[in-house]
Image: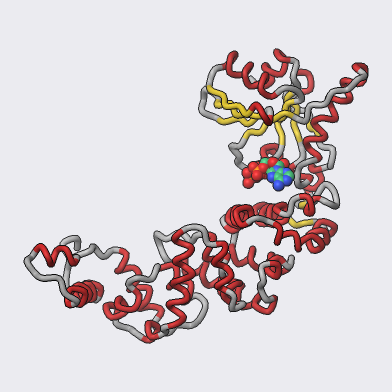
């Protein structure tokens, strides 16, 4: 359909970016990105009229999305439109607009295009030799100022290293080391966005280590000497999560590990956006302030120390040090998760009792008994 639209409208169209890379790698990818050399809005309107589906356009950027009748989403952007006074040079110019679009991209492997135009259908446009870097498993920038222009590319580079088991070439790594200070210029949201994508990509401990090598953490006020502890901690945390069924680690718990081992966890608060991540930091402080919970083996008793603490925070601490009651703690967390709420203060009031501080004790004792499996709940 895209080829047909290109032929009908006379607007050349190309498949670009990640999907081209992934086609060569035989890697699944559902994000179809098309660049057209011409008016993207006209192109989208033509697709809609000829083939149906649905379109959304942003006139201002001459971009939009076509929802193919099958449900597949297809993003269309316009390569920069340029007007030239010599009509004779038009074919060249058309070629160079796609090239310019590719030149604004991040890495050679992401800067390839496949022609969708009838007579050239399937022809590869690869001005930076991305093919070669795919073969050699290399992440390589297109020019020396790439990371200065956009420091998020540093984190993108690490992400692609992890995902494909590729490596930056030496030049690119040197450029990262030179530009790493620019990480400090990123807004919280951009940094968080990239860290989330990165830490969800592969083994967090490997990512944390790689970011130490690139002097990334230093930019966030972290001491390089915390590297070893941070890596060991994240490895253990990965292990604990593997054993702990039904709980998915969020990226933030790994992100704060280097802060914790640099004694600057409080500075990580500025990156905590969600309630859950704010509470995680708070709970880690609570657990560090009162360490009695680490010496209790009675699962029910543990509840009075840990009942308001998130399981994430507990897992965080037990994977950073040797806690001798680790087994009991894991049992406690598992039972707590499955514990129905038996009684609330309101229930007691409904039974005709007058509110009193005793309520808390009654409820607590009952919960403790359930956690120790001394009494059965209906659910059991
Ligand atoms: P993913 O599979 O994670 O989506 P992707 O390569 O498709 O990987 P996107 O973030 O969807 O990544 O970006 C699509 C394309 O846009 C990239 O392949 C790249 O060509 C370009 N791109 C994305 N972000 C940048 C950036 N910060 N600087 C330059 N080009 C970028």
Tell whether 112 sits left or right of 159: right
Tell whether 237 sits left or right of 33: left
Vertical side of 292 occupied by 272: above or below: above
Does any portion of residue 12 appear in the rendered image?
A: yes
Q: Residue drawn 66% across and 22% down?
A: 41
State which quadrant residue 199 falls in.
bottom right
Q: Residue drawn 83% across and 42% down?
A: 129
State which quadrant residue 42 falls in.
top right
- In the picture, the quarter occupied by the N terminus is top right
Does any portion of residue 373 appear in the rendered image?
A: no
- In the picture, the quarter occupied by the C terminus is bottom left
Tell whether 368 sits left or right of 154: left
Residue 349 coordinates in the image, percent (x, y): 12, 65
Residue 5 coordinates in the image, percent (x, y): 67, 17
Q: Residue drawn 57% across and 24% down?
A: 55
Vertical side of 250 occupied by 146: above or below: above
Residue 285 coordinates in the image, percent (x, y): 47, 76
Q: How many marks?
A: 0
State which quadrant residue 77 falls in.
top right
Vertical side of 371 occupied by 323: above or below: below
* Colour convention: secondary structure
């Amino acid at each position: 359909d895209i080829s047909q639209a290109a032929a009908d409208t006379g607007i050349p169209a190309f498949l670009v970016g990640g999907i081209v890379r992934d086609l060569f790698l035989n890697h699944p990818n559902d994000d179809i990105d098309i660049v057209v050399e011409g008016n993207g809005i006209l192109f989208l309107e033509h697709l809609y009229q000829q083939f149906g589906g649905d379109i959304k356009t942003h006139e201002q950027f001459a971009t939009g999305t076509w929802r193919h009748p099958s449900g597949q989403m297809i993003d269309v952007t316009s390569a920069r439109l340029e007007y030239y006074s010599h009509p004779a040079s038009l074919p060249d110019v058309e070629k160079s607009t796609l090239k310019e679009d590719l030149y604004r991209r991040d890495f050679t492997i992401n800067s390839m295009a496949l022609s969708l135009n009838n007579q050239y259908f399937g022809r590869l446009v690869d001005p930076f030799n991305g093919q070669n870097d795919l073969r050699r498993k290399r992440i390589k920038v297109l020019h020396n100022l790439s990371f200065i222009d956009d420091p998020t590319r540093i984190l993108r580079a690490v992400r692609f290293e992890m995902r494909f088991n590729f490596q930056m070439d030496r030049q690119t790594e040197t450029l990262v080391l030179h530009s790493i200070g620019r990480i400090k210029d990123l807004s919280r949201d951009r940094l968080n966005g990239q860290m989330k994508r990165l830490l969800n990509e592969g083994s967090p401990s490997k990512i944390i280590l790689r970011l130490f090598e690139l002097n990334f953490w230093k930019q966030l006020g972290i001491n390089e000497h915390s590297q070893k502890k941070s890596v060991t901690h994240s490895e253990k945390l990965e292990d604990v999560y593997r054993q702990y069924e039904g709980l998915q680690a969020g990226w933030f718990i790994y992100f704060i590990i280097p802060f914790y081992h640099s004694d600057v966890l409080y500075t990580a608060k500025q990156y905590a956006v969600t309630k859950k991540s704010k509470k995680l930091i708070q709970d880690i402080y609570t657990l560090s302030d009162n360490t009695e919970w680490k010496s209790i083996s009675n699962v029910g008793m543990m509840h009075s120390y840990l009942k308001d603490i998130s399981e994430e925070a507990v897992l965080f601490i037990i994977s950073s040090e040797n806690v001798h009651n680790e087994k009991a703690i894991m049992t406690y967390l598992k039972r707590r998760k499955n514990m129905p709420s038996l009684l609330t203060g309101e229930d007691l009031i409904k039974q005709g009792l007058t509110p009193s501080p005793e309520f808390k004790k009654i409820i607590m004792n009952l919960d403790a008994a359930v956690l120790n499996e001394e009494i059965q709940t209906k659910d059991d």
